[in-house]
Amino acid sequence: MITDKLKNFVRRKSFHVTYVDTGSCNGCSIEVLATICPRYDIEQYGIFVHHPNPREADVLLITGCVTEQWKTKLKELYDKVPEPKVVVAIGACACSGGIFDQEGKRTHPPLKNFIPVAAEIPGCPPRPSEILDAILGVAPIVFKDYDKKEANK
Amino acid sequence: MTEKNVDVSIPIGPLHPALKEPLRIKLHTEGERVVDAEVELGYMHRGIERILKGKPWNKAVYLAERVCGICSNIHCMTFIETLEKISDVEPTPRAKYLRVIVNELDRIQSHLIANVSYFLGIEHETLAMYMLDVRENSMDALEIVSGNRVHMTWNVLGGVRWDVEDHQLKMILETLDKMEPRVRRYRGMFAHGPLLQLRSKGIGVLSYEDATKVPAVGPVARGSGHPESDWRLRHPTYRDIFDFKAISRKEGDNTARVLIRFDEIFQSMDLIRDAIDNLPEGDIKNRGKVKAGEGFHSGEAPRGELKYFVKTDSAGKIDDITIRTPTRLNLESCVGYMLAGSPSIADAVAIYASIDPCIACTEG
């Protein structure tokens, strides 16, 4: 189908990214911010990251171990993102709780207990190039032939 | 709230295109004018102080550092200096200089990203991108010295983690020489740009008296004419060896706060050059043991005074710890004095970004 081909082509190189901080130390957040700088320049790949808005996002970048307040709100946030969508967990906190998963914690890691996660980037924090690599690697795979996959379900 | 005539309450956040971290600001407005503002926290609380209790000190360093990812080094440094104060350990002369080098490099990148988020707040994307590009150079310099971009764990009890070679110091100096003319150019662009000044001059004014009421700390206080708020004036290394002088301005508006950060970047560059030129030879670490005791210590984070209270037991474990971070105070001055009475809702985001908030620090 020509529409499928067109959709595949468009989705391969044009998506909105929203980053959500669910209780990180800001280390991952500034590395996400660093991906928009001219050295890494996420926008040259057709990714828009400037103004995070879940209602027009394709990729959700989530940092941080899930804090008490985010426990119920994460699912709501995930439902607000239109299909097709990809969740990328950034940093050790989002993957496993990292250093905050210890006795006396006030957090509820890992992230995948709350919403489906497509990719995890370990590191405390991961480098901007790794974040860029993960977004570019995982999103096209999920978005490819998305409508066909949905119809077959 | 009852006596004031409030038309609409406008919430900003917790997830908002202008905010980098989740928090909710409620603006009570009368027409376009902001009458009052409230702030709602709690989205970032990880309970670090609770986790820290009962941890051995050498494990606690990593956690103390992860209170904040932007001003990571100063948390590590203040925590270690509190322990040194408790257990009478003095860092070696070379370690003192190396601590200053990394601390000031960290301050440069933190001030740069603070101004980046201000320029993104007033939607001047070009200048923000220029400055993000310069910031990558300072991150390179940090990586050359410490081996990591964000969490370095540079300070250990009685010294620093490892030694810095001469060629690394030369690379830092080259990086600074590369950065300085560019940052000067961007400072000029901000100070003399009419459109940028239209969004900044006379907006979000915090008067000299109001700054003492909260009290505001860091660049916010120094922008309102309080040079004594810089805790580097009281730090033994800065006070005795580098003869440190604090910068201040009198205007108290967004322009003053942004220019203070620009000027402190140049000041930090001079401090690093000074430290590298006079770097003494010798050991980088003094041996020592953490004793039982308790004590307060303050350090100057890029955002202001950072205060640690630590109580240790004889085994070197943390019995009790309290961290008071600068944004805790600055947020109050922002909400209570700058936002309330702001003539326009459109300026609220710019005013909020100008205090360089770090919510991850505040909630801990």
Image (cartoon, rainbow, N blue to C red):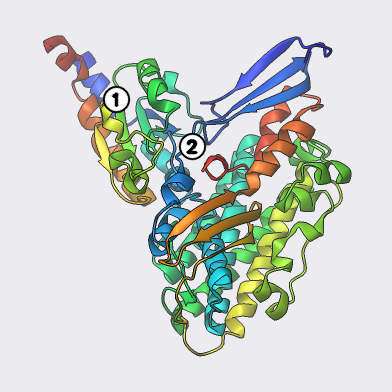
Dot label at residue B45: 2
Question: Which of these two is toward me, A38 or B135?
Answer: B135
Disc 1 crowd, CA 10 A, few/some/many (<14, 14-19, 20+): some
Q: Chain of mark 2?
A: B
Residue at the spot of label 1? A115
Residue drawn at point x = 32 percent, y = 42 percent? A97
Looking at the rendered image, the quarter that the N terminus of chain B falls into is top right
Foreground residue among B158 and B241: B158
Q: Looking at the image, do the residues carrying marks 2 and 1 touch, with CB atoms under 8 Å apart?
A: no
Is residue B82 or residue A139 the one in the foreground?
A: B82
- SS category of the residue bearing label 1: loop
Kindly identify which chain the residue marked by label 1 belongs to.
A
Badges 2 and 1, same chain: no
Q: Residue at x 54, y 40 (%)?
A: B363
Specify few, some or many for label 2: CA neighbours under 10 Å numbering under 14, 14-19, or 20 or more: many
Compute the Cα span from label 2 to label 1.
20 Å
Q: Position of residue A141 (x, y in %)?
A: 20, 31
Quarter of the view holding residue A56: top left
Q: Nearer the viewer, residue B315 or A138?
A: B315
Amino acid at circle 1: Ile
- Helix, strand or loop for disc 2: loop
* Residue A30 seen by the camera: no
> Up-down: is B257 above or below B182?
above
User: What amino acid is labelled 2 in the image?
Assistant: His
